[in-house]
Amino acid sequence: MEQVDYALVDFVQQHAGQTVLDLGCGLGGYSKVLAERGFDVRAFDVVPEYVERARELGVPAELYDGERLPLPDGSVDTAILLEVIEHLEDPVRLLGEAHRVARAGVLVTTPNCTQSFGRVPIEFSHMLDVDHRQFFTQASLAALLDEVFGSCEVEQVAPIDRNLAGLVLPRPLRPLYRWLDRFGRAKPQYFFRLRARAPAR
């Protein structure tokens, strides 16, 4: 099973309703843990291999074509996008679908890319061709969510555990991060998470 950051699970448990839609479920780790905690979970991902792996965990995962979700308006309590929107060329489309189907609200988390690594000249563009497509500050995420939901408050929360840096960094950069961290050159601010609760429809 993929690594699960339980700070994200706790965030969902604190704010979600009974039925949870996990959009961009990946390998199904979060869906599985949430189901074990008593939530009724449905999950979607655009990658067929991820959907199959999630199903192997017992997660009711379905393939999403990137267009309209096969769900009626207001059919789930809460939609969650955990570390997903930074991977999307057009996050507005998926956020709009989440807003349409969730009657109680949408939960969003993403890495906070306000700062880079210390004084080491690592440009965000080095990551673009590897994994991430979007990089959000508190202000830019708020602007994106305001566009979709009308208004939304974005907060910065505690740093992501350094042992979980792999959840954020593309694989080619992880050895460099470990080297920087060893010598105290990696700024933990880079790993602060942004999270938001978008209002109901």
Image (tube, rainbow, N blue to C red):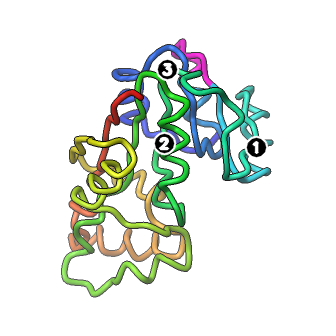
On residue 77, the disc is 3
Reading the image, the residue beneath label 2 is 81
In the shown orientation, is residue 59 left or right of residue 186? right
On residue 150, the disc is none
Q: Is residue 42 above or below residue 46?
A: above
The magenta stretch spans residue 36:
yes
Q: Residue at x 60, y 16 (%)?
A: 40
Q: Position of residue 82 (x, y in %)?
A: 47, 43
Residue type at mark 3 is Asp
Q: Which residues are magenta?
A: 35-41
Label 3 residue SS: strand
| Spatial CA span between label 3 and label 1 | 20 Å
N-terminal-most mark, 3 or 1: 1
Q: Nearer the viewer, residue 167 or 88?
A: 88
Reading the image, the residue beneath label 1 is 63
N-terminal-most mark, 2 or 1: 1
Q: Residue at x 38, y 27 (%)?
A: 200
Q: Position of residue 59 (x, y in %)?
A: 70, 28
Of tags 3 and 2, the one toward the viewer is 3
Number of marks = 3
Label 1 residue SS: strand
Q: Residue at x 39, y 47 (%)?
A: 148
